[in-house]
Image: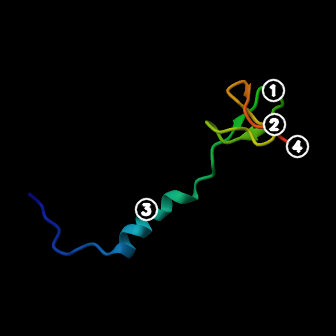
Amino acid sequence: MAVPKRKQSKQRSRKRRGANRFAAPQLAKDPMDGTLFRPHRVNPANGMYRGRQVVEVDA
């Protein structure tokens, strides 16, 4: 079984994992008014989530 000869440094691990942060966030389109919002979250523009009004938004 292969075993690492030296401990991998925190900096080296974090560099590798940090490269995944730079992807643009995925956005979903609201069928009601066409605004873009993060999926599986309340739409901040109108307060709707899965077809229900869950947050009152001041217009």
Mark 1 and mark 3 residues within 8 Å of each other at the beta carbon = no
Label 4: few (<14), some (14–19) or many (≥20) C-alpha neighbours in 10 Å: few
Residue 12, image quadrant:
bottom left
Q: Which mark is residue 45?
A: none
Along the polypeptide, which appears first: circle 1 or circle 3? 3
- What separation in Å lies between label 4 and label 3 (alpha carbons)? 39 Å
Which x, y percent locates residue 10? 35, 73
Q: Amino acid at mark 3?
A: Arg
Mark 2 and mark 4 residues within 8 Å of each other at the beta carbon = no
- What separation in Å lies between label 4 and label 1 (alpha carbons)? 17 Å
Q: Amino acid at mark 2?
A: Asn
Along the polypeptide, which appears first: circle 2 or circle 4? 2
Residue 37, image quadrant:
top right
Along the polypeptide, which appears first: circle 4 or circle 3? 3
Q: Nearer the viewer, mark 2 or mark 4?
A: 4
Which residue is disc 3 drawn over?
17
- What separation in Å lies between label 1 and label 2 (alpha carbons)? 9 Å
- What separation in Å lies between label 3 and label 2 (alpha carbons)? 35 Å
Mark 1 and mark 2 residues within 8 Å of each other at the beta carbon = yes
- What separation in Å lies between label 1 and label 3 (alpha carbons)? 37 Å
Label 2: few (<14), some (14–19) or many (≥20) C-alpha neighbours in 10 Å: some
Please identify the residue farthest to the right as the structure is shown: 59
**Residue at the (23%, 74%) spot, across then down:** 7
**Residue at the (50%, 57%) spot, across then down:** 20
Which residue is disc 1 drawn over?
32
